[in-house]
Image (tube, rainbow, N blue to C red):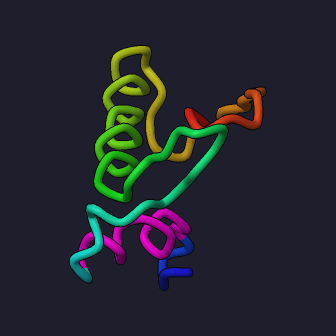
Amino acid sequence: MSANGNAAIYFVDRHLAEGRSAKTAFIQGGRSLTYGQLAEQTGRLPDLYAKIGIVQEDRVAMIVHDVIEF
């Protein structure tokens, strides 16, 4: 994990920095997602949070299915 405790830096961002954006990050039921796609899709979340008024240090609970989209 990164020094600031953000797991996304270790699990996603470092792969981009090390040139693996086209490598597969997840495979599920015949579908796959690359590190580049994962970074692009997860990068949308901060914009959504800002749009609905959630700011840094707020807490959010999510209940989601265990599927590639989440």
Position in image of residue 17 (x %, y %): 23, 77
Q: Which residue is at 38% across, 54% downward?
A: 34
Residue 45 figure quarter:
top left
Residue 7 locus on image (x, y percent): 55, 68
Residue closest to the eye, 3 or 17: 17
Q: Which secondary structure type mostly characterizes the magenta part of the structure?
A: helix
Q: Where is residue 49 in the image (x, y as percent from the top left)?
A: 43, 26
The part of the image, by quadrant, that contains residue 70 is: top right
- Is 46 situated left or right of 3 in this image? left
Return the residue nearer the eye: 19 or 6.
Answer: 19
The residue sitting at 50% across, 69% down in the picture is: 11
Farthest residue toward the top?
52
> Is 15 colored magenta in this rendering?
yes
The N terminus: image quadrant: bottom right
Looking at the rendering, the stretch of residues picked out in magenta corresponds to: 6-17
Q: In this view, does 49 lie above or below 33?
A: above
